[in-house]
Amino acid sequence: MGRIMAIDVGGKRTGLAVTDPLQIIATGLGTIEAHTLIEFIKEYIKSEQVDRFVVGWPTNWNGTPIHGTPHAAKTIQLLQKNFPTIPVEKVDERYTSKMAKDAIFEMGLKKKDRRDKKLVDKVAATILLQEYLRSVQGP
């Protein structure tokens, strides 16, 4: 069994998280420049098996696209083109950034550290993956 990789797409940065090989625990992998995503994944899968990509799908409450939706759509196309054997799933990402900021605040980090957008993106990807795992594994 391989890992599941969650991708929290942004215009500049992309947060990444992965599961353990048993697909039980979500862990933040890091934040990278958005334009380096495909090359990063190519390097990553040289040493780790990835069974599925989970991509955050940003929408309004009524399901209409928002400013980040085109970035996510482009990322999904690139993943399907470059990794055709690995399934890609869209996952609702509403409130993941807010939840990430709240979680970081609760960690007790200094205000300067809480403003680190890279940390927020990594934590948001981890939350996205945790929610996905909860939805497929049940309570």
Image (spheres, helix red, strand yellow):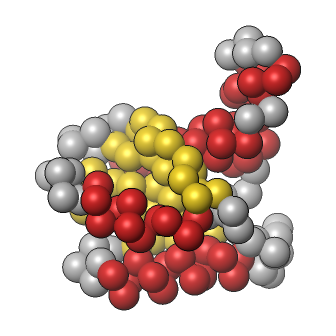
Asked if residue 139 shows in the view, the reply is: no
| Towards the viewer: 132 or 50 | 50
Quadrant of residue 115 within the rendered picture? top right
Asked if residue 87 shows in the view, the reply is: yes
Answer left or right for 65 relative to 139. Answer: right
Answer left or right for 57 relative to 2. Answer: right
Answer left or right for 61 relative to 125. Answer: right
Residue at the (28%, 44%) spot, across then down: 23
Residue 58 horizontal/vertical position (percent): 71, 68
Residue at the (64%, 57%) spot, across then down: 13
Identify the image quadrant of the C terminus.
top left
Residue at the (33%, 81%) spot, across then down: 82
Residue 37 horizontal/vertical position (percent): 47, 65
| Towards the viewer: 31 or 61 | 31
Q: Is residue 91 above or below residue 21?
A: below
Residue 64 horizontal/vertical position (percent): 80, 81
Quadrant of residue 105 within the rendered picture? top right
Residue 27 horizontal/vertical position (percent): 43, 36
Q: Could you tell me how many numbered marks the image carries?
A: 0
| Towards the viewer: 98 or 34 | 34
Answer left or right for 57 relative to 136. Answer: right
